[in-house]
Every structure is written in C-alpha cells, then in structure tokens.
Image: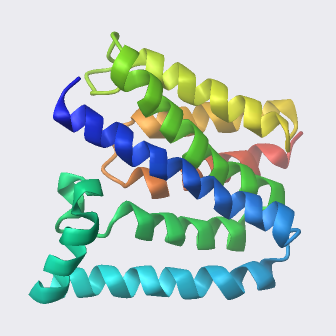
C-alpha cells in the first residue's frame, strides 16, 4: 500500500464520524430543523471563516497545516476543505429535503464514501470507466448505502438513492464528494419519493 493510500484510509476513519450529523438530526433533534440549524449554521460559518482565513493569511495557513495538514488532499490546499463542503451539504439537505431523505442522503456520504475507500483501496482490482475508482469499492458503497436507506425509506427509494450515491462517488464530475453524494442522492430520492 502506498503512502497516499495510507493517508486516504486515515482520512476515512475520521470521515465516518460525519454520520453524527444525520444521526443527531434524527435521535437528538427529532427532525426539528430550527433546533438543528441553531447548531449547524454557526458550525458552517466557523468552517467557512477558518477556510477563508487559511486561504488568505500566511500565518494562519501555517498554523492550520501544522495541526491538520496531514489530512488534506492536494486539491484542498487551494480550495475549501471537505469539512466545509460537508457542513454546506448538511445545511442544504436538512433545509430542502424531506426529513428522512435528509438523514439518509447525509448518511450515504459518511457510509458509502468511507466503505468505497476502505474496500476499494486495499482490495479494488477492477477500475470503472477509466477512473481511479474500483468496482469492489463501488459495490461496497452501494451495499452500505442501500442497507442504511432501508432503515428509513421505501425500498425503491432506498435502492435508487444508493445507486445515485454510488454513481456520484465514482463519477468524474469535478465537484467535491461531500457536496456531490448527498445532494445528488437527495434530489433523486426526493423525486422518486413523489411517485412511490
């Protein structure tokens, strides 16, 4: 396993903790958007301020990299971090999607993206459509998302959502996964949910 792969697996062990956002919305806030936003919006603003300060001020940038630089991907050095995109996604999902779909779409990011890496990096042999993503990782992403989706949603909605999250995870579209996975799956599930 390369150093880059080890770093990515290390990132994913922290990434799974993002499941706390949708689970808090369900278990702690009982789908109360206003209460959730009292926590979520200030955290999102703080994440944006930190990222802007890091990108604009050399001293803050140096302190930031000394603390968490090992966790950053190459594209995050000159752009927002995945954590900021995650907070933005959480605000959008909880603000606009039906409550169960908001929980599931955000959980798809935590579960699916993490499983794709944990399975795909060490065991992935078959690459998908000229991407660096593997069939094995994508199947793990799909299975994890589908099983979680069944806990909250109609099986058809869960199936379509898991498939959308998986396609978003391995797609070449140059949007951060923390935006792409929950927003794409949430939009598709909200649409399908109208008809089932």
Q: Position of residue 104 (x, y in %)?
A: 72, 49
Quarter of the figure with residue 68 = bottom left
The residue sitting at 82% across, 46% down in the picture is: 193
Q: Quadrant of the C terminus?
A: top right
Q: Quadrant of the N terminus?
A: top left
Q: Is residue 184 left or right of residue 127?
A: right
Q: Is residue 92 left or right of residue 174?
A: right
Q: Position of residue 87 (x, y in %)?
A: 52, 70
Foreground pick, 20 / 154:
20
The residue sitting at 56% across, 88% down in the picture is: 42
Q: How many marks?
A: 0
Q: Position of residue 182 (x, y in %)?
A: 58, 53
The residue sitting at 84% across, 49% down in the picture is: 194
Quarter of the figure with residue 143 = top right
Q: Which residue is at the far top? A: 125
| Colour convention | rainbow
| Vertical arrangement, residue 77 with respect to residue 195, above or below | below
């Amino acid at each position: 396993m390369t150093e880059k792969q080890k770093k990515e697996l290390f990132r994913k062990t922290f990434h799974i903790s993002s499941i706390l956002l949708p689970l808090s919305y369900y278990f702690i806030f009982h789908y109360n958007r206003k209460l959730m936003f009292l926590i979520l919006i200030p955290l999102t603003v703080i994440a944006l301020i930190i990222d802007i300060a890091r990108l604009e001020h050399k001293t803050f940038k140096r302190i930031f990299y000394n603390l968490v630089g090992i966790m950053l991907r190459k594209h995050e050095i000159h752009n927002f971090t995945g954590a900021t995109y995650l907070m933005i996604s959480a605000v959008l999902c909880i603000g606009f999607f039906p409550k169960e779909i908001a929980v599931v779409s955000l959980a798809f990011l935590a579960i699916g993206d993490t499983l794709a890496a944990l399975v795909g990096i060490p065991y992935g042999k078959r690459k998908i459509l000229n991407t660096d993503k593997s069939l094995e990782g994508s199947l793990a992403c799909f299975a994890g998302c589908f099983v979680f989706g069944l806990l909250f949603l109609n099986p058809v909605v869960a199936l379509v959502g898991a498939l959308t999250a998986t396609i978003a995870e391995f797609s070449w579209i140059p949007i951060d996964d923390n935006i792409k996975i929950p927003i794409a799956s949430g939009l598709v599930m909200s649409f399908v949910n109208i008809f089932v």
